[in-house]
Amino acid sequence: MAQEIRGSGGAPGVAIGVAYLHGVESSVEASHSDAVDVASARAAFVEARERVSARLLGLAERLRSEQRAEEAPIFEAQMLLATDPSLESEVFGRLDAGSPLPSAIADAVGSMRAVLESLDDPYLRERGADVGAVGTMLLRSLQGDERSLADLPAGVVLVAPDLTPAETVDLPAGRVAGFVTAYGGPTGHTAILARSLGIPAVVGAGAAALAIAAGTMLALDGEQALLLVDPDAAARERYRARQQELASARARQQALAGLPGATADGHPVALWANIGRPEEARLAREAGAEGVGLFRTEFLFLQRDRAPGEDEQYRAYREALEIMDGRPVVARTLDIGGDKPLPYLPQRPEANPFLGVRGLRFCMVHSDLFQTQLRALLRAAAHGDLWLMLPMVSTLADLAWGKAQIALAAEALAAAQVEHRATLPVGIMVETPAAAVAADLFAPEADFFSIGSNDLTQYTLAVDRGDGELARRYDAGDPAVWRLIERTIAAGQARGIPVGVCGDLGGNVEAALALAGLGISELSMAPAALLPVRERLRQVTLAEAQALGKARLA
Ligand code: PEP
Ligand code: MG
């Protein structure tokens, strides 16, 4: 009987092949403790760091030259971690206290990683893995082991405790069938890279993955995060059939990428993409995005030690607009707080951060930061169709404050005679029950609504969206959530303003049809979801979608 192992996430696709172990028997350990003097150990650290940062930089440059620029920042960020003075001082401190170099590196990296992993924000928590990857590279380099995985035998499924992003990006896509890691989570860079490289993978499969013997037959389904060890002939056949199905679905869907979103009978539903970095707009375009419905601008502020300045932000917003080439780009202003703290702007401790100083409320406390962002956005708006969207709005006063701040930023630019655009659509995220219930009061004051179903679900059902143990209660399909959505759409339609959805619900194929049926004008989703949603939408009529929408309310 095949053994079934479930991972915590992965990269979609099906792989069948024999196990090829990497780092399982000989995972890098800080074991050898050559008694060298502190000065030579310091010098050895500096040399290893230089080799590692040169390799990371080389990878980033290679990716940029291969038109895979969107992956390059991962390695640039790791390079910054490797050369971070705090890592050096942590390592040197341990050397001074008598630790051998490998332990000093392992301990220093371990403690930096522990700090990141104790944070609430899942994104920052996963960045702990980047620190770990840098540590692994340093230790390997110290042992003279800079093995690349580029020469793997064809058709194997790689099994490893974890892969560093540098190893992942080196994997020969098309030749390696897929990979399995014992550690790592669904939003870690290893998984993100596997998705963008199109390598099927299961991550976070746990210790059971490390017990797999080399050469064992494996079958994995990355979408289900499922691994079969030693599948029988029937299971292999099933996985093979699924593999073919996926390949033909993808080819079929890609052929539709150039068509606008619409139902079978031609009712238009614009299909837009969610992005966190300007480069991701490229992926969005490849999948046929007709606009960007949510640019989570706070991602430009995370993973660094101070806020990006006005010019840096201006370039980032302008880049997204230029890639979208005249199509609308909805920039959400800073949504910090809740599960996304800023390390360099610590907030007072809050008992309930999601109910605390979050989104627009955070900007009210840090209005300088907000003004800088708004000036950068209004300057970028001169280069495309930029819309501004305010997060976490719960009262009309919130919206009025946001609009006054935008006017203030425009005045400052005008006074300084800086090129900008002062009038542009300003809308709100409808993600608090208050905004949805009072949508008819907000509609005359907003140029558009975009429903944030992720937060709307958490606040409506009073369930923390990030709490794994409550995951079953966090159900965006609950009729209470859908009734608020229906109400918001009705209020927007009565006033003639567009109403979109930019929460995860919009990228769920079946929910997308029902939302279209309720009269949503635009659905914004992860770029990867665009192809299947566009295809499915074209298979139903408006009347069918309407019936699906109605059924969600009961
Ligand atoms: C939402 O809340 O649905 C949303 C799109 O915003 P975020 O997930 O970034 O909070
Ligand atoms: Mg939200």
Image: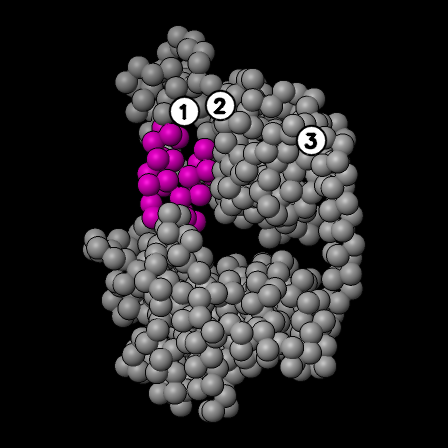
Which dot marks residue 231? 3
Question: What secondary structure is found at the residue carrying circle 1?
Answer: helix
Residue under the point 42% across and 39% down: 128
**Drawn side of residue 128 relative to residue 405, left or right:** right
Residue denoted by label 2: 139
Point out residue 14 in the picture as x, y percentages from the top left corner: 69, 43
The Cα atoms of the two marked residues, 2 and 3, are separated by: 36 Å
Q: Are the residues flagged by discs 2 and 3 in contact, CB closer than 8 Å?
A: no
Residue under the point 58% across and 42% down: 225
Point out residue 538 in the picture as x, y percentages from the top left corner: 71, 72
Residue under the point 52% across and 83% down: 498
Residue denoted by label 1: 106
Q: Earlier in the sequence, mark 2 or mark 1?
A: 1
Residue under the point 76% across and 32% down: 233
Q: Name the chief secondary structure element in magenta.
A: helix
**Drawn side of residue 368 relative to residue 190, left or right:** left
Q: Are the residues flagged by discs 1 and 3 in contact, CB closer than 8 Å?
A: no
Q: Earlier in the sequence, mark 1 or mark 3?
A: 1
Q: Are the residues flagged by discs 2 and 1 in contact, CB closer than 8 Å?
A: yes
Mark 1 residue crowding within 10 angstroms, few (<14) / some (14–19) / many (20+): many
The amino acid marked with disc number 3 is: Pro
The amino acid marked with disc number 2 is: Leu
Point out residue 4 in the picture as x, y percentages from the top left corner: 59, 33
Q: In front here: 2 or 50?
A: 2
The Cα atoms of the two marked residues, 2 and 1, are separated by: 8 Å
The amino acid marked with disc number 1 is: Ala
Residue 11 seen in the current view: no
Mark 2 residue crowding within 10 angstroms, few (<14) / some (14–19) / many (20+): many
Q: Which residues are magenta?
A: 108-132
